[in-house]
Amino acid sequence: MPRYSFIVPIYNEEDTLPELYRRLQGVMNSLDGEAEIVLIDDGSRDRSLALIRELHLHDPRICYLSFARNFGHQIAVTAGLNFARGDAVVILDADLQDPPELIPEMARKWQAGYHVVYAQRIQRRRENWFKRLMAYGFYRVLRRLADVEIPTDTGDFCLMDRRVVDLLNAMPERNRYIRGLRAWVGFRQTAILFERDPRFAGDVKYTFRKSLSLAINGLVSFSRVPLRLSTYLGLFSAAIALLMVVLVVYWRIFAPNSPLTGYATITIAVFFLGAVQLISIGILGEYIGRIYEEIKGRPLYTLGEVGGFEATRETTNPHSRKMVN
């Protein structure tokens, strides 16, 4: 069994795969034990899967999974965790914004007794100010609102001990926010600071919509504050309504000809209460929708092709969520 496993989700990364393999190969040769690369093709529409097959034939240390369709980045990482066999498991992106050259330093921290070693960004190179501002604000809001302490400015790039990986694999939830789950399990954790490089090649895969969806997922998964927000909005609207009653009585008695006692006041009150109700319903819908997803019990992903795991793969149920002994 390998000592290290590298999990890399792949979605339309034909331009970066050769350079990714070259740099990972150099890292593997410098480590103190055998390593494997687990590539997860998340329903790519370019030549990514064909290149992955070629790399697997060229180097047996490369194993791969191919989804039957696109399931998303977090599910791809989850599948890699299900199949990874190493004592230490590293998650990194294929666009080389997560520099593989940090892995040996992570391994040294792991050998020193840490169970989770995560990379913490101190700078985002060549990213526009809007994206940097949104990321900065989100991580700090999440840290304040979450039930567990999730480190700021951290992504999925990390090294995890086998004990942590086994715990993550045992978690049945479907709306997975890996960096939050990683913090929730506890154990000894430490950070490595780095400057995030620009994408090596190709187009950005994580659009604003996907980033926003991930942010909402992380907030809802690890905080009950949005539910309390509905209560606070209700109390606030009740206080506003009481104040309006007092003002209307005052205007009727002391300023009967004031235009503020007309339709404008009523319209503002109706719109305000309507907004509060819609916000509250939307927040409840987010949580109820997650309950609905959980109780359906469908597998997290379906596999169209598997390579390199034949010795340990269970063949009785090809659609199970966890298919490794």
Image: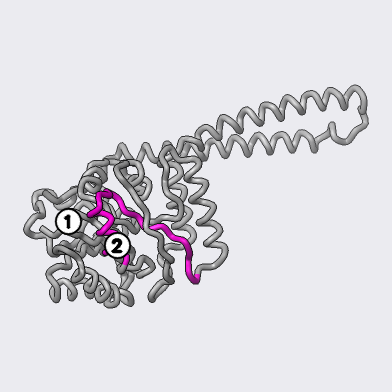
**Which is more toward the observer, 219 or 103?**
103
Coloring scheme used: one colour
Determine the image quadrant of residue 248.
Answer: top right
Name the residue at 59% across, 35% down: 277
Q: Which residue is mark 1?
A: 86
Residue 302 visible in the snapshot: no
Q: Residues within 10 Å of mark 1 (few under 14, many from 20)?
A: many
Q: Foreground: 197 or 193?
A: 193
Q: Amino acid at mark 1?
A: Gly
Q: Is residue 229 left or right of residue 102?
A: right
Residue holding disc 2 = 105
Residue situated in front as seen by the camera: 185 or 325? 185
Answer few, some or many: residues within 10 Å of disc 2's Cα (few below 14, many 20 plus, some between 14 and 19).
Answer: few
- 1 or 2: tag closer to the N-terminus: 1
Q: Residue at x 76, y 33 (%)?
A: 266
Which secondary structure, mark 2?
helix
Q: Is residue 264 left or right of residue 62?
A: right
Place of residue 287 in the rendered image (x, y in percent of width and height, measured from the top left): 43, 38
